[in-house]
Amino acid sequence: MHIIQAVIGAVLYMTIFFSIGFILNMLLKKTWTLVFIYPIFVIMMIDNVKLSSYVTETSTALTSVYEGLVGLQLLDLFMLGFGLLGAILAGVTIRFLRKSGYSMF
């Protein structure tokens, strides 16, 4: 992966997760919803294990997650980190808007 692709990907991840987090925070009225859900998104992106396998075949599924996390390259971590940053910024933005008196619904 070239550095240009990583920069564009990082900006896209940040924008996407900021947008999703902002909308979830508005609708659910919970400030940090996506920050807690984000690791589940990351796990779903890096391994190809069914969600039911975490209950039925726990050790195999967790081994797959570990191998996926260890196999990530620096640029992958860079992009995923910017996704987390977008989710955090959505929470900060919603908190600021609520303190300023803005009511969503």
Image: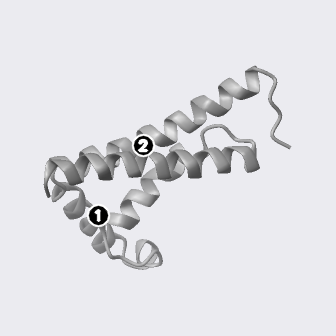
Q: Quadrant of the N terminus?
A: bottom left
- Quarter holding residue 32: top right
Q: Say few, some or many: other residues with alpha carbon within 10 Å of mark 2 (under 14 / 14 to 19 / 20 or more).
A: many
| Residue placed furthest toward the top | 100
Residue named by callout 2: 84
- 65 vs 103, left or right, is left
Q: Which mark is residue 65?
A: 1
Residue shown at 31% from the left, 53% from the top:
9
- Which of 10/29 is in front? 10
Residue shown at 86% from the left, 43% from the top:
105
Residue shown at 42% from the left, 38% from the top:
85
Q: Say few, some or many: other residues with alpha carbon within 10 Å of mark 1 (under 14 / 14 to 19 / 20 or more).
A: some
Give whichever of discs 2 and 1 has the lower sequence position. Answer: 1
- Which of 32/6 is in front? 6
Q: SS for tag 1?
A: helix
Q: Where is residue 88 shown, x and y percent of the image?
A: 50, 36
3D distance between C-alphas at marks 2 and 1: 18 Å
Q: Where is residue 16 shown, x and y percent of the image?
A: 49, 52
- Which of 74/66 is in front? 74
Q: Where is residue 35 shown, x and y percent of the image?
A: 52, 43
- Which of 81/2 is in front? 2
User: As shown in the figure, which amino acid type bears the numbered disc 2?
Assistant: Leu
